[in-house]
Amino acid sequence: SLVNTKQMLQDAKKNKYAVGAFNIHNLETLKAVVKTAAEMESPLILQTTPGTIKHAGEDYIAAMAEVASEKYDIPIALHLDHGNSFDLVVKCIRAGYTSVMIDGSMLPYEENVELTKKVVEVAHAAGVTVEAELGNIVGVEDDMYVKEDKSAFTDPKMAVDFVEKTGVDSLAIAIGTAHGMYKGEVKLDFERLKEIASLVDIPLVLHGASGVPDELVKKAIALGICKLNIATELKIPFTNAIKEVFKNNPDESDPRKFLAPGEKAIEEVVKEKIKLFGCGGRA
Ligand code: 13P
Ligand code: ZN
Ligand code: NA
């Protein structure tokens, strides 16, 4: 059965690697991620945004993830990514999600604390782990768009206060990553990461990992990042592989024929990411 992220992230923190959290959208993307993680004996976090839940249904998603967890001998968590309401959190926990993110990063600080605290209370009662976010991660994710100038990096002292007050299990921090691919050079505030990691006890999460150069990812992991979120770098090759099918055969009408190449394309990316994150062989 599915597990929460407690043990896998604690182990990642202790042994200085990171667990890959991959955003999936349907059966094909889920299968590609799960199969590759199992081949590489890696712990795995499958995650879906509210938009994907609207598209596929939390019950269908939970059922597929549950089947995957029975089929393979690796720890798999099903995580709500960027949960945007208390109600959705409860809905996901009822459906079988084992981990949730409550994203109150757009709220005034005290309201973020209150909402996160409330989520922690119900989630922990159900054995579900909670991720929260402090500071703003820019770019487009799902239906939300955070403009560059609105961005605020995570304040280290505020992070300490936030973790203390909320009892959250892991914390997503803003140090310069963005959702989607990057236009210019990626610059991360490693000094800030170092300071947060030295003050905060719980595993730290980096969103917007697509497009971050490998060297920077490695450095972020060495400095305390234990979970990395990958969405765009799966979406683009999945879609490109399908486009390629129709370019060569515009009359293709068998979903199995045009979806299979998308699935293959995702497998390649997941393999590279698991190698980079160091989570292979940790299952
Ligand atoms: P990317 O789309 O940049 O991979 O960001 C993913 C993410 O942070 C999901 O929460
Ligand atoms: Zn994110
Ligand atoms: Na990104």
Image: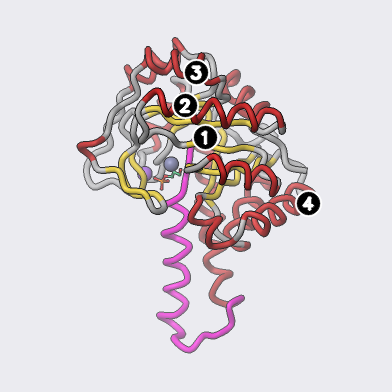
User: Which callout, 1 or 3, points to the residue nearer the camera?
Assistant: 3
* Residue 163 tag number: 3
The answer to the question of whether label 1 and label 3 lie on touching residues, with beta carbons closer than 8 A, is no
User: Mark 2 and mark 3: span between their CA atoms?
Assistant: 20 Å
Give the secondary structure at mark 3: helix
User: Which callout, 2 or 3, points to the residue nearer the camera?
Assistant: 3
Identify residue for label 2.
221
User: Mark 4 and mark 1: span between their CA atoms?
Assistant: 24 Å
Q: Reading the chain from its start, which is encountered first: label 4 or label 2? A: 4
User: Which callout, 4 or 3, points to the residue nearer the camera?
Assistant: 3
Q: Quadrant of ligand 2?
A: top left
Give the secondary structure at mark 4: helix
The answer to the question of whether label 2 and label 1 lie on touching residues, with beta carbons closer than 8 A, is yes
Question: What amino acid is found at the position of numbered circle 2 in the picture?
Answer: Ile
- Between 100 and 35, which is closer to the camera in this rendering? 100
Residue in the picture at 33% in, 19% down: 155
Examine the rendering and report whether any part of residue 215 can be seen: no
The stretch in magenta equals 227-256
Identify residue for label 1.
277
User: Mark 4 and mark 2: span between their CA atoms?
Assistant: 30 Å
Q: Reading the chain from its start, which is encountered first: label 2 or label 1? A: 2
User: Mark 4 and mark 3: span between their CA atoms?
Assistant: 36 Å
Q: Reading the chain from its start, which is encountered first: label 1 or label 3? A: 3
Q: Quarter of the image for the N terminus: give it.
A: top right
Residue 148, percent across and down? 23, 40
Q: Reading the chain from its start, which is encountered first: label 4 or label 3? A: 4
Identify residue for label 4.
71
Question: What amino acid is found at the position of numbered circle 4 in the picture?
Answer: Lys
